[in-house]
Amino acid sequence: MDQQAKEKHSKRIHQKETHVKKQAKIAKQLGIQEKEPHRFAKHSPANCGNPKCFMCGNPRKTSNELTIQEQKFYQDPDTIRDKRSNGIVPDEIQVYLDVRNGTQ
């Protein structure tokens, strides 16, 4: 193992350890006592694991709403929206629609 590979390896281990420490601190603030803090390496302490929980479960199953990905898929690209619709500033949307439709 050369020096560069050793540095990368030690950096990965350090990142993992700091992530576990941060998650353990969050768990302590939430009042969760954990004997094995390394459990938080791939699992958030705020996730209860109950699929029927409205915070942890799928919104389609808990409250009959579409997921964010489904909302993006079903949105109408021709509707003018102020909130980051298609990456276009709201003033430029009408100009964009006119150019696209060939009415300019």
Image: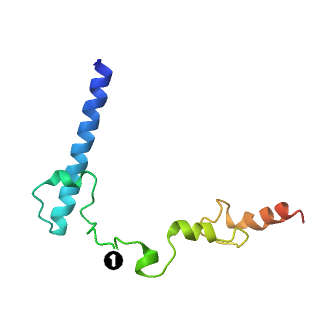
Give the quarter of the image for residue 102.
bottom right
Q: Is residue 95 left or right of residue 66?
A: right
Q: Which of 104 and 70 is in front in this view?
A: 70
Of all residues, the one furthest to the bottom in this rendering is 63
User: Residue 58 at x, y = what percent?
Assistant: 41, 72
| Residue labelled with disc 1 | 52
The residue at 31%/24% (across/down) is 5
Of all residues, the one furthest to the top in this rendering is 2
Q: Quadrant of the N terminus?
A: top left
The residue at 90%/66% (across/down) is 103
Of all residues, the one furthest to the right in this rendering is 103
- Asked if 1 appears above or below 14 in the picture, the reply is above
Give the quarter of the image for residue 6.
top left
The residue at 35%/77% (across/down) is 54
Q: In which quarter of the image is the C terminus?
A: bottom right
Q: Which of 36 and 29 is in front in this view?
A: 36
